[in-house]
Image: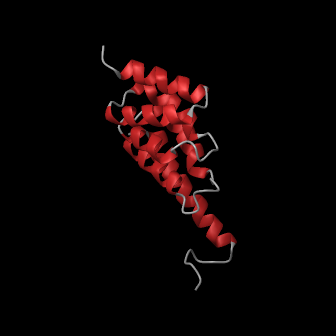
């Protein structure tokens, strides 16, 4: 047995306690030793609405754990608008993680986003191009 179960357990405990310093430390460790046992905690952390959680780093760890169980949360993250992320980098990273998961459900999420965004631009009276 390696260090992964200990990292996963401590990551979960830090998230539960909202101990963001310890969470960040073990998130870095998770990046070095990613394991499917971390998926649930990483998913939960991606839904926390605080700048204390390094959402993009959590998603980067998930890139190495292409777990279909994460799809519902990743789909939610893609559609969220975090106030401190005006350029939607968190959503983009979530799409990257989704792209690593090879299931029909995963393939449908980006298509849905494109359809939504296309519908939004048409609803604004545009043709999908930005006005200058």
Q: Please, is residue 77 above or below residue 22 in the view?
A: below
Q: Position of residue 58 (x, y in %)?
A: 46, 40
Tally the numbered discs: 0
Q: Position of residue 88 (x, y in %)?
A: 54, 58
Residue that protrudes farthest toward the front in the picture: 21
Direction from residue 83 to residue 112 in the image, left or right: left
What residue do we see at 33% from left, 30% from top?
33
Residue that protrudes farthest toward the top in the picture: 1
Q: In which quarter of the image is residue 130?
A: bottom right
What residue do we see at 56% from left, 74% from top?
128
In depth, the one of 45 and 51 nearer the eye is 51
Specify whether residue 5 is in view: yes
In depth, the one of 80 and 16 nearer the eye is 16
Q: Please, is residue 66 above or below residue 6 in the view?
A: below
Q: Please, is residue 86 above or below residue 6 in the view?
A: below
What residue do we see at 55% from left, 40% from top?
46
Image quarter where the N terminus lies is: top left
Direction from residue 5 to residue 84 in the image, left or right: right
């Amino acid at each position: 047995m390696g260090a992964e179960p200990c990292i996963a357990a401590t990551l979960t405990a830090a998230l539960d306690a909202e101990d963001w310093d310890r969470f960040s430390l073990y998130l870095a460790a998770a990046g070095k030793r990613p394991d499917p046992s971390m998926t649930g905690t990483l998913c939960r952390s991606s839904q926390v609405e605080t700048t204390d959680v390094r959402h993009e780093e959590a998603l980067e760890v998930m890139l190495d754990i292409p777990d279909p169980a994460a799809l519902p949360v990743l789909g939610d993250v893609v559609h969220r608008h975090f106030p401190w992320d005006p350029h939607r980098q968190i959503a983009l990273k979530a799409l990257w993680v989704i792209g690593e998961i090879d299931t029909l459900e995963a393939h449908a999420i980006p298509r849905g986003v494109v359809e939504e965004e296309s519908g939004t631009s048409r609803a604004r009276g545009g043709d999908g191009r930005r006005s200058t």
